[in-house]
């Protein structure tokens, strides 16, 4: 269905995330992957989805040479905890501190998607509220040592071991926490 809708577009996914690439395959979208280096720095006064909107737009702005048929999709995800953005951890200590801070608390996972052509751009975002159980230091270290979550915002993947043992409540889209609010992307693309 979506494949037919997008047949006149050259869909470009600007993401190295294997999870986002799998979502595109599962949605039956013909796409290519193109990556451009972008320094993911945002103004300090931005909060929550303002950050992910800004970064999704920043990633899209790196593609200033779109052709008539190109449809570019960029995305960014953060974990929002205690009025602070948690991105990808720098190292094991950073990952440990992030997971320890989320232990026994609620946090938000926020993802923004930019859909850009030569003629238009639209940005949509989604927020999921995740509640973690209390985690022991041993559990956190086990997860980091065995799953190496250094490519994930907030230092965890909901689809991995920690998701099974840590998450006791989810308000919103599971897929958003994995890295893409697929339902929102589908609605935007089917309505092009």
Image: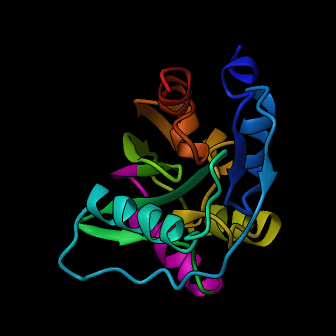
The structure residue drawn at horizontal position 38% and vertical position 44%, both measured from the top left corner, is 125
Residue 30: x, y in percent?
A: 81, 36
Q: Which residues are magenta?
A: 91-109
> In this view of the protein, which residue sits in the foreground, 60 or 27?
60
| Residue 72 drawn at (x, y percent) | 61, 52
Quarter assignment of residue 52:
bottom left
Q: Where, by quadrant of the figure, is residue 83 drawn? A: bottom left
Looking at this view, is 179 or 94 the one in front? 179
| Image position of 100 with respect to 2: above or below | below
- Residue 154 appears at what percent x and percent y? 51, 64
Query: Position of 174 compared to 146: left or right?
Result: left
- Please report the residue visible at 79 percent of the width from the left and 43 percent of the height from the top: 31
Depth order, front residue of 179/39? 39
> Given the current orientation, which residue lies at the most extreme left position?
45
**Left or right: 134, with 153 as reference point:** left
Whether residue 93 appears in magenta in the rendering, the answer is yes
Q: Quadrant of the N terminus?
A: top right
Q: How many dots with numbers?
A: 0
In the figure, residue 43 lies in which quadrant?
bottom left
Asked if residue 173 is positioned above or below residue 158 in the image, the reply reads above
| Magenta residue check for 96 | yes
Q: Is residue 109 visible?
A: yes
Say above or below: 62 vs 48.
below
* Res 160 visible: no
Left or right: where 58 falls relative to 20: left
Could you tell me which residue is drawn at 57 percent across and 32 percent down? 182
What residue occupies the far top of the structure in this picture?
1
* Residue at the spot 55% in from the left edge and 29% down from the top edge: 189
On screen, residue 109 versus residue 176, left or right, reads: left
């Amino acid at each position: 269905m979506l494949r037919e809708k997008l047949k006149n577009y050259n869909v470009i996914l600007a993401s190295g995330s294997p999870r986002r690439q799998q979502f595109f395959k599962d949605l039956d979208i013909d796409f290519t992957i193109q990556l451009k280096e972008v320094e993911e720095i945002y103004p300090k006064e931005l909060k929550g989805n303002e950050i992910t909107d800004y970064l999704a737009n920043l990633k899209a702005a790196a593609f200033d040479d779109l052709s008539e048929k190109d449809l570019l999709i960029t995305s960014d995800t953060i974990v929002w905890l205690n009025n602070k953005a948690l991105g990808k951890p720098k190292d094991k200590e950073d990952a440990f501190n992030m997971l320890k801070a989320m232990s026994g608390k609620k946090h938000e996972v926020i993802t923004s998607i930019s859909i850009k052509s030569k003629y238009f751009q639209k940005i949509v975002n989604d927020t999921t509220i995740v509640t973690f159980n209390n985690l022991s230091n041993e559990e956190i270290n086990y997860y980091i040592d065995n799953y190496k979550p250094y490519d994930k915002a907030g230092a965890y993947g909901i689809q991995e071991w920690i998701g099974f043992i840590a998450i006791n409540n989810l308000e919103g889209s599971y897929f958003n926490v994995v890295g893409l609010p697929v339902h929102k992307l589908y609605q935007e693309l089917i309505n092009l």
